[in-house]
Image (cartoon, grey):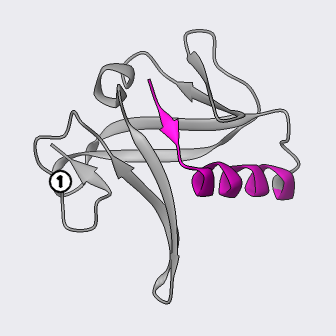
Amino acid sequence: MITLSEEAGNAVKAAMSRAGKSDGGLRVMVETGGCAGFKYLIGLDTEPRADDAVIDAGGVKVFLDPDSQPLLTGLKIGFVESLEGSGFTFDNPNAGTKCGCGKSFG
């Protein structure tokens, strides 16, 4: 359902280690907003919620709420580091449009 690049997986694992949440996972959600209609929300979580889908993506647990799941099927999460900064990238086959920064889609 969702895949993480090796770089994204390493970034999540490092963040989990720094936060002391090595048993947790990465929560990925979609909410209305952003310049294209929907925006991605990601963060570390200690455990899944009762109605979450839990996916193993390269050794990282990914928690998805039921409302976000249809919009995230096939999502590929990457991670880039550059002079301008570092951050996650999203390649979503469900996105008909996306904004210039790549953080929202429609």
Q: Residue at x 33, y 38 (%)?
A: 31
Whether residue 95 sits left or right of residue 58 in the image: it is: left
Q: How many marks?
A: 1
Whether residue 14 sits left or right of residue 56 in the image: it is: right
Q: 73 and 26: which one is in front? A: 73
Q: Residue at x 63, y 18 (%)?
A: 49
Q: What percent of the width, then of the height, locates residue 37?
A: 17, 45
Q: 78 and 69: which one is in front? A: 78
Extreme residue in the left direction: 96
Q: Residues within 10 Å of mark 1 (few under 14, many from 20)?
A: some
Check disc 1 and report the residue beneath it: 98
Whether residue 83 sits left or right of residue 25 in the image: it is: left
Instruction: Give the magenta part as a residue range.
Output: 1-18
Q: Residue at x 19, y 40 (%)?
A: 95
Whether residue 22 sits left or right of residue 82 in the image: it is: right
Q: Quadrant of the C terminus?
A: top left
Q: Eyeballing the image, is 48 above or below 91? A: above
Q: Eyeballing the image, is 38 above or below 48? A: below
Residue 48 is covered by the magenta coloring: no
Quadrant of residue 27 within the rendered picture: top right
Look at label 1 and name its amino acid: Lys
Quadrant of residue 89 within the rendered picture: bottom left
Please name the predominant secondary structure of the magenta segment in the image.
helix
Q: What percent of the width, then of the height, locates residue 84?
A: 45, 86
Q: Residue at x 37, y 26 (%)?
A: 68
Q: Quadrant of the N terminus?
A: top left
